[in-house]
Image (cartoon, coloured by chain):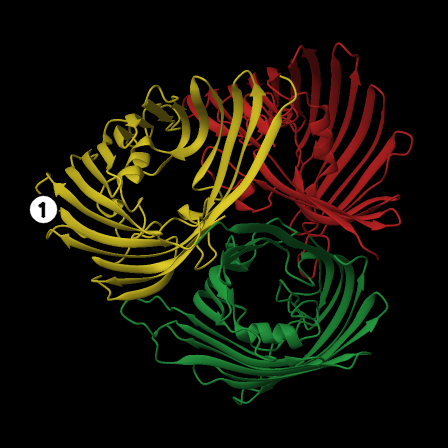
Chain colours: A green, B yellow, C red
């Protein structure tokens, strides 16, 4: 409780590219789009050393669209992240709008990092963020770490309705990462819920990194499906080749699964600026209509090709 | 008109806490909320020395919600403040969206500073901000200072309709502060108005500070009520105990008054970071439905309990 | 692809003034308005040297209203500009929401720089910005430079619908500037379009600068009109006197043209802060209803008078 240091950091990403989408019901679409590889953002974050190993932390992150100047995430100012918290030797406790542990794992194992045409989330079920959330993240215990997140439903008279729960437990050491993550959303009455569990792993062989994800999803109303993702990242000079196969396996009898094949390449112009290209092709089952999107848009057809630039500051 | 210095300062508050609300018509509500003690904000302000005692000044302040990432103040980008002006030996003249002198006084005399469960504005009538406003603030003349604010109604063909007028006159010296403030809002036709006068005082005895507010409110359409607020702030080590009694005295015959008892405690972790807790209980007259809110939300019931963290940067 | 330098610059303008509008259908209007001379804005821009003459650049610029705190440009976060791109010896290639070459020329030749009561755009047809745009700007070749801008329409199945095209070619050397600019907007079916061509020139005689603009406009549906603008800027001590005559010549037989006479004065208090005043009077043909606005608002009547302050940071 003595004199303290605060640091404020402004940072961001401005990403724009040309996207070709084919195979949509309304016809082909060519567009200039924002946040193809990574959602365009402007962030304000800070940390204050409170002494005794304790620190106050915050992060406020705006998502926006470079192509139109509009806000992302449905018009929220800090729609990507908005939280304040305390960090200590026991971990981090934070309050606000935050990433779910489930999405954080998908982002880690997807070679496309949930961006570009090959975004694993084109097929894989996930919930990127949760509101009204208290999150506890443990420190790294010899490679083991975990997260627990609780999001209040905020329905008067019903503490269960609309609440969300997230958790993860992982191990990371040297070239190996293994993690399990879970997310659960109660419906508006608190009597049913949607839940997803993702098991993910990654191994860096040096010449290439391989990753794997298996997801189990039970939706409110009885839907039941599984996700499988196999990915590889191959560093090539100042760039990297990305490839993945993703499968949505529908187990509800609706014949609504799909397969996705994706290939991409990113080339660094500097540590902060890169150009990228990517292609993805989805094969939908007769009852499915999955589309190849990117980090910011869901896409309009079963084929997408991207070319663009991403600058970090 | 010579070379000048401009300074730009980024500042803000990120505040989040758990709020328990009881006694609302739809049932109990537990939530993670933003801006419980102070509205969460991000501000940009600057000053340029123009020479000869003259300075250009501006302040742009965003209000946002840490729990959802959304904009506060109904979606305005700089909904808290947005103004530019000139300062000199004669005072400050500023143009834009600004605080009313009436609200500034209430904020000064309320030990809860219009935040936490004990927010005096749960009962006390006030208008925090006014648009389209020219404000003149005098310098401090041996402890005496005043403000005058005029907000254009901007109704074509009717200069009176919707215009607002604010004014205050105060004295502050050593431990004593005394002030009177007035605010008046013309209705949409310019033929009726709502007006509030607040008389407030504060005395710092050292071991504790006591404050008092008396408000007289006449609404458009003939409503008539008075506000009484008694508050005390007791510094305790790195913290402070806050307590207040607020009374809304309805004089319109609608039996729509209320009493509020409030207690709070804030504890500094550093000069910039503190934790807080607060409790308030409102006793409504049969015709009233006042709710215990906080700095950002009106609340849903007649009882509220808060616990949270506030970080300034 | 080696270590690089990034610079991030925060900048902006806060502008507010009192505007008197006369001659509108609903009566006279007096208001405190934002962005009378220049739209109020807050910007974030940066550049990273990528080596080999190549640089990454971006600009994100928010428009807001000082009088209400609200967002400008219909609620867009970066409604003024949002783009990322690469610059090299061959010019600049940028992607996002950007100014049209047509508007850039009008802004250059108008002594009021499309602000104040005398804003040439009160009568002159122009489109300030275009979305989804790839823009190429050449470097300066012995005084000659040009721009080419293509904005995707983004209508599925119809690449022509809603797309926009802009171009300019200019010469600037010493006191002389000459430029031609064109803008074309396809309609929602891609079968009709609106197009405007502007020829502008400026000569700085030292004691005064004279400027001239001639515009040819063909609207979708067959509208046809021409714009003529004559302007002069006279530096006077720390200030400048601005004057212009603008004429909208309707050639569609609707008798919907108008003349505008405008006078203004800006006075610098420093390099970054100035005060301003301006007056404009529009004489509408029987079929026209043009109004005297300013940099941010279209105005409500055929006469407007402004007085205010603009601070840049």
The residue lying toward the viewer, choosing from A188 and A300, is A188
Query: So how many labels did they put on this image?
Result: 1
Residue A92 lies, with reference to residue A258, above or below; the image says above
Q: Which residue is mark 1?
A: B255
Subunit of label 1:
B
Q: Position of residue B185 (x, y in %)?
A: 29, 31
Classify the position of the N terminus of chain A by image quarter. bottom left
**Residue placed at 53% from the left, 79% from the top?**
A168
Q: Quadrant of residue A205?
A: bottom right
Q: Residue at x 74, y 12 (%)?
A: C208
Residue C235 placement, left or right of B208: right
Q: Is residue B253 at least partly visible in the picture?
A: yes
Image position, residue A243 (x, y; %): 76, 77
Answer with the quarter of the image where residue B125 lies: top left
Q: Does residue A255 appear to the left or right of C32 in the view shown?
A: right
Return the x and y of residue A215 as percentages of the image width and height.
Answer: 58, 84
Give the residue at x 57% y 73%.
A103
To which quarter of the image does residue B16 belong? bottom left
Give coordinates of residue C53: x percent, y percent.
87, 46
């Amino acid at each position: 409780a003595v004199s303290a240091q605060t640091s404020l950091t402004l940072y961001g990403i401005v990403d724009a590219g040309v996207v070709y989408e084919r195979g949509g019901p309304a016809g082909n679409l060519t567009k200039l789009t924002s946040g193809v590889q990574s959602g365009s953002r402007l962030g304000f974050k800070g940390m204050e050393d409170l002494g005794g190993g304790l620190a106050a932390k915050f992060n406020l992150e705006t998502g926006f669209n470079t192509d139109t100047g509009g806000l992302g995430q449905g018009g929220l100012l800090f729609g990507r992240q908005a939280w304040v918290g305390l960090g200590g030797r026991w971990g981090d406790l934070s309050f606000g709008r935050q990433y779910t542990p489930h999405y954080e794992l998908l982002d880690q194992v997807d070679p496309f990092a949930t961006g570009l045409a090959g975004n694993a989330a084109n097929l894989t079920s996930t919930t990127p963020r949760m509101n009204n959330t208290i999150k506890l993240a443990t420190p790294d215990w010899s490679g083991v770490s975990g997260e627990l997140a609780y999001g209040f439903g905020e329905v008067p008279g019903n503490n269960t309705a609309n609440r969300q729960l997230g958790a993860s437990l992982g191990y990371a050491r040297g070239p190996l990462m293994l993690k399990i993550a879970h997310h659960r959303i109660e419906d508006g009455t608190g009597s049913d819920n949607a839940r997803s569990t993702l098991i993910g792993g990654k191994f860096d062989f040096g010449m290439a990194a391989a990753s794997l994800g298996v997801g189990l999803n039970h939706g409110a109303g009885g839907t039941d499906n599984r996700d499988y993702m196999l990915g590889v990242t191959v560093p090539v000079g100042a760039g990297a080749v990305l490839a993945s196969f993703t499968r949505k396996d529908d187990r509800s009898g609706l014949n609504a699964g799909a397969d996705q094949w994706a290939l991409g390449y990113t080339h660094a112009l500097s540590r902060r600026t890169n150009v990228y290209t990517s292609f993805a092709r989805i094969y939908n089952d007769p009852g499915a209509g999955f589309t190849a999107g990117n980090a910011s848009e869901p896409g309009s057809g079963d084929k997408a090709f991207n070319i663009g630039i991403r600058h970090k500051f």
